[in-house]
Image (cartoon, rainbow, N blue to C red):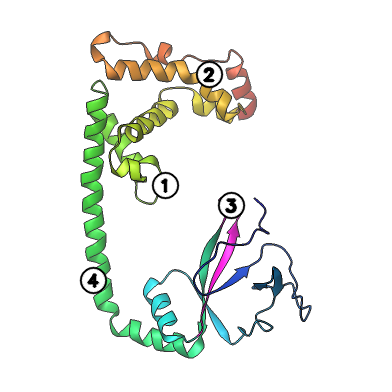
Amino acid sequence: MAPSATPQERKGLLVIQPLKRRYCVACRRGPLSMLVLEDAAPRCLGCADLDHLVFLPRGDTALTRRSREESTLSAVVVRFNRRKARYERQGVLVDEAALARAEVRCLADAEARRRRRVRDARRRADWDVRFAAAFAAEIRRLFPGCPAERAREIAAHASMRGSGRVGRSAAGRALSEGAVISAVVASVRHVDTVYDRLLMTGVPRREARRRIAAGVDAVLRQWRDPTAGTTPVAERAPDPDPGLRVAEAAVDR
């Protein structure tokens, strides 16, 4: 997606930090560090009557919220993220006097907010521990042959806060069977097969997954039915490409 796409509608004024060199259609100033789109045309903050505002970067939620409460006029500042193909919030523009008042308010209750953050962090940590244990238990229920320590490792990896992995999705938090199986499959793919080595030698991701599919299925079958006998690791994750070792040596050099 090209970064020229307009951001989604938001409540209030919107200011954009452009990725390309853009110039104001009214005064021709530029390149602009921030702009406002009016009728799909860029205007500088001066021509948009916003140049009296100051920029407050994101990061301090309380200060941002209070600055917007104190400021009669404010705007959200966004920038396009090419990798994620979406606009992301960078901060806000607020009145300088409003920012000063908000800073005074934040200083007045800074200790109380610090203690609250500590309590909230402790609650989140406790919840994360309980959730990871429940996730590991669900792995063991679906794959009784999976070693307990391995199940805990998979659960901890999949449910890491802020990771965006399957354990943090809505399905993962609900411990849906599909999400749990996805986490197990991902772990087996990376740990029990040569998948990572294939990627390192330039094999396309889909092709690499096709080559190691039999090895993944073998491990999953063994974990689902541990009474079926143990398949040697060498057979679970065969080298799917006879020239792989040669290619790896070339990469190492």
In the depicted view, which residue is nearer to us: 123 or 201? Answer: 123
| Front disc: 2 or 4 | 2
Label of residue 211 in the image: 2
The residue beneath circle 3 is 85
| Coordinates of residue 135 in the picture (x, y in percent) | 26, 37
The residue beneath circle 1 is 164
| Front disc: 1 or 4 | 1
| Coordinates of residue 121 in the picture (x, y in percent) | 26, 60
The residue beneath circle 4 is 115
In the depicted view, which residue is nearer to us: 40 or 112? Answer: 40
Write the start and end of the magenta stretch as one range.
73-86
Q: Residue furthest bottom?
A: 97
Q: Earlier in the sequence, mark 3 or mark 1?
A: 3
| Front disc: 3 or 4 | 3
| Mark 4: secondary structure | helix
| Type of the residue with mark 4 | Arg
Q: Disc 3 versus disc 4: distance between alpha carbons? A: 37 Å
Q: Quadrant of the C terminus?
A: top right
The residue at 66%/57% (across/down) is: 3
| Mark 2: secondary structure | helix
Q: Disc 1 versus disc 4: distance between alpha carbons? A: 27 Å
